[in-house]
Image (cartoon, rainbow, N blue to C red):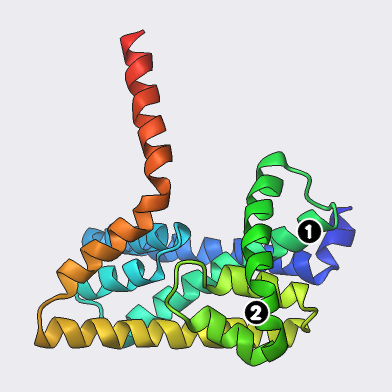
Amino acid sequence: MKHTLLNTIEGRLLLSGFFLSALLMVFIGFYGITDLHIAKTLVLVFIAHTVGGRAAGIGLCILNGFGAFPTILYNFYIEVLIVCFTYAGFVLSTTNYLRNEWIIKFMARLTGKAIEQKDKIKPFGWIGIFIFVMAPLPVTGPVVGSIIGYMLRLSLFKNFTATFLGTLTAIAVWFYCFDFLEQRFHMIQYLFAAIVIIVLIPYLKKIKEFVVGNTNRRDN
């Protein structure tokens, strides 16, 4: 089964995700030794992306003095890494290679989001995926965009070029918009705080349940 899995495109993407993750850990580990502040920022940016906040990740880089090239490159790298895992996980779970209950539930949520948007994007094909991924809206992004591309039966090349070019464009636009506000109006701190709040809103119920659960356990 392992041999068969590694001979599929999705299996190789999953392996690529692990390779990119290993490189990321080495990179963060290097700065953990040489510059702890940068290492902490890199970790926080990664966390921001995993909860769906590429804008928050870019804002963190700017607030901590990262320039245009490292900000765009690092945030793009993280998005590519995440897509490798989620796209491969989605396809492999639908083809019964992955049968983990947690993965299946997570992919089911992503599938629901993709289905909601698929019919709107279908008439536009490649450019539809590109615009969807680039758009600064809560439901958009490379993860859902790549899954929609799979549902529309785009080739992997067309799907990923649309997804990653849209991602790169969005990151560049976010960076220069934030940088403009920071240099001229010094508003990025407030805008960044608002973005963090918006990102956390869907998780407030889970956070409350976690806090209440820990309080109850301590009381018992």
Amino acid type, residue under disc 2 in the picture: Lys
Mark 1 is on which residue type? Leu
- Judge by depth and name the residue closer to the eye, 166 or 10: 166
At 63% across and 62% down in the image, what residue appears? 86
Nearer-N-terminus badge (2/1): 1
Image quadrant assignment for residue 124: bottom right
For label 1, the crowd category at 10 Å Cα-Cα, with few meaning under 14, some 14 to 19 and many 20 or more, is: some
Residue under numbered circle 2: 120
Kindly give the residue lying farthest to the top in the view shown: 220
Residue at 68% of width from left, 70% of height from top? Answer: 147
119 versus 33 height, above or below: below
Residue 2 as seen in the image, left or right of residue 46: right
Instruction: Tell whether 204 sits left or right of 97.
Output: left
Q: Quote the CA–CA distance across marks 2 and 1.
A: 25 Å
Figure check: 166 above or below 190: below
Density class for disc 2 (Cα within 10 Å; few <14, some 14-19, many ≥20) is: few
Where is residue 219 drawn, in percent x and y? 31, 11
- Residue picked out by circle 1: 92
- Counting labels gives 2
Side (left or right) of 20 relative to 10: left
Q: Residue at x 73, y 42 (%)?
A: 100
Instruction: From the top left corner, tell me how far across and down residue 171 is, in percent.
Output: 40, 81
